[in-house]
Image (cartoon, coloured by chain):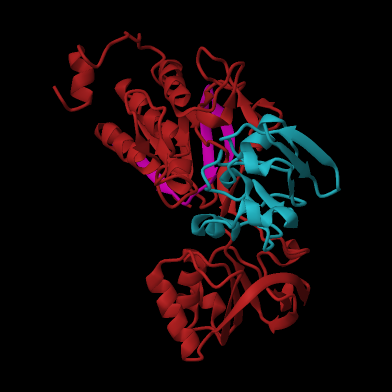
Chain colours: A red, B cyan
């Protein structure tokens, strides 16, 4: 794509641990870019628990996932980290000692001295609905996201789901589809009431169809879908002829490409780290938060914060090999306070 | 402590004791019952502790809340007797409860 982005540290994952890593790295003069597959900052806290309470953050008797992430964003503001959202790191190549070239699924390239994997349970990816043989149609006539609306012009579209994605795309694609059917398991929708009302208006005007039920079988050839067999809730079946199927069943966490980067793993699921530095088996690649493993590991946000602090000490040696690191407190160090913009 | 039986999709039954006040999901995880993942840890934020409640127990266990119904949209093989086991509290009335785990979690 373009010129590589050269910076000190690339953090993979913008959840609470990735965010706090920005703070610890920043205090030691290291600049960071963050990549996250979600369209928002906060990781699981934003995607799974925005409104749910967390009771075990030190000194915060009660905070929501959203509240925690907002507070972290305030805390790391002085360090001006750059976020690259809706992007997934695909390949990591060692080009120096240590120096890495990192490529994302959007073709963006980073050249960094240190990589911090703070990817939690892995990357959030669209959930595949339980329809036998659906894999054969994926990418050709089954899509989990709409990249270009024009690709759907004049097509017979079947959208499945009852959340915001399903409803938003129903409303957006209805004007350009030759025929659109929205299929949902039940008569209630999770989506915003306004979207539901707009959808119901389209149904009332006869411009789209709404069907209650679940897809049970797909028919087609060579990746091109022709019909979907839908099981209604009363057990009866009927067919919907369609050219494209868009299932919106939410997100699930998958480890993703991390397993291919030559890092030693535990049970193929977690990155093994040294508990003094939180470095992996590859010098220069660190892992903090839920994605790492060491004897005694607890998947707690507070553990991830501790891991971030120790990681930054070792990362400093790679980014500034000639500088001696002096341990300082933010309470008393003028130089730290200057970095935080408070002195 | 009420006894709870989990039957997996192949028909293997496992009976364990549940602590009153805990949930059917927590009881499963504590006893390493296969077929329940509970990815989100019991926050009703995923659908990976999905169970089918035995017909004889449906009335006692009750229906899912609207929030739980929303999450069930993401489940696999969702039926009228589907529940998320993290939302079923273990009570004395549930002595002998039978639930079935689906072939896979979402």
Residue A91 occupies quadrant: top right
Residue at 67% across, 25% down: A264
Q: Is residue A290 above or below residue A175?
A: above
Residue A313 % position (x, y): 41, 15
Residue A237 % position (x, y): 75, 79
Horizontal side of residue A206 vs B96, given as left or right:
left
Dividing the image into 4 quarters, which one contains the N terminus of chain B?
Answer: top right
User: Residue A214 versus residue A92: which sits nearer the camera?
Assistant: A214
Dominant secondary structure (helix, strand or loop) of the stretch shown in magenta: strand
Residue at 21% across, 13% down: A333
Residue that sits furthest to the right in the current view: B11
Horizontal side of residue A146 vs A30, given as left or right:
right
Decide if residue A129 is in sight here: yes
Residue A282 occupies quadrant: top right
Q: Is residue A185 above or below residue A261?
A: below
Residue that sits furthest to the front in the current view: B93
Q: Which residues are magenta?
A: A80-103
User: Residue B16 versus residue A318: which sits nearer the camera?
Assistant: B16
Residue at 50% across, 48% down: A37
Q: Is residue A180 above or below residue A299?
A: below
Residue B78 % position (x, y): 68, 60
């Amino acid at each position: 794509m373009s010129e590589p982005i050269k910076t000190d540290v690339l953090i993979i994952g913008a959840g609470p641990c990735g965010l706090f890593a920005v703070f610890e790295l920043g205090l030691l003069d290291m600049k960071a870019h963050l990549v996250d597959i979600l369209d928002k900052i906060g990781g699981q806290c934003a995607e799974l628990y925005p409104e749910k309470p967390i009771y075990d953050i030190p000194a915060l008797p009660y905070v929501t996932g959203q509240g925690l992430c907002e507070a972290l964003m305030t805390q790391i503001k002085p360090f001006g980290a750059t976020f690259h959202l809706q992007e997934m790191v695909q390949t990591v190549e060692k080009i120096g000692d240590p120096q890495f070239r990192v490529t994302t699924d959007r073709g963006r390239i980073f050249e960094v001295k240190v990589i911090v994997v703070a990817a939690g349970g892995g990357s959030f990816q669209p959930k595949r609905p339980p329809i036998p043989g659906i894999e054969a149609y994926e990418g050709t006539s089954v899509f989990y996201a709409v990249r270009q609306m024009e690709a759907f012009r004049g097509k017979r579209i079947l959208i499945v789901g009852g959340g915001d994605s399903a409803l938003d795309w129903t409303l957006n694609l209805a004007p350009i589809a030759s025929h659109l059917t929205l299929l949902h398991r039940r008569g209630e929708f999770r989506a915003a009431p306004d979207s539901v009302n707009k959808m119901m208006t389209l149904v009332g005007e006869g411009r789209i169809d709404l069907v209650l039920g679940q897809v049970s079988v797909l028919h087609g050839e060579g990746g091109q879908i022709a019909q979907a067999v839908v099981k209604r809730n009363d057990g009866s079946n009927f067919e919907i002829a369609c050219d494209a199927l868009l299932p919106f069943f939410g997100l699930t966490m998958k480890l993703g490409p991390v397993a291919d980067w030559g890092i030693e793993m535990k049970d193929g699921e977690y990155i093994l780290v040294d508990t003094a530095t939180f470095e992996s088996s590859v010098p220069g690649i660190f892992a903090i938060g839920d994605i790492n493993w060491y004897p005694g590991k607890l998947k707690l946000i507070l553990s991830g914060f501790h891991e971030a602090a120790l990681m930054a000490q070792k990362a400093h040696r790679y980014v500034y090999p000639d500088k001696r690191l002096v341990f300082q407190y933010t309470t008393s160090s003028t130089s730290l306070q200057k970095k935080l913009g408070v002195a | 402590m009420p006894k709870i039986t989990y039957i997996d999709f192949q028909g293997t039954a496992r009976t364990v004791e549940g602590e009153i006040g805990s949930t059917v999901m927590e009881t499963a995880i504590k006893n390493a019952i296969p077929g329940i993942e509970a990815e989100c840890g019991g926050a009703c934020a995923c659908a990976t502790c999905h169970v089918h409640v035995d017909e004889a127990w449906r009335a006692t266990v009750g229906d899912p809340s609207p929030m739980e119904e929303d999450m069930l949209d993401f489940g696999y093989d969702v039926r009228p007797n589907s529940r998320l086991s993290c939302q079923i509290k273990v009570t004395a009335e549930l002595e002998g409860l039978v639930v079935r785990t689906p072939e896979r979690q979402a």
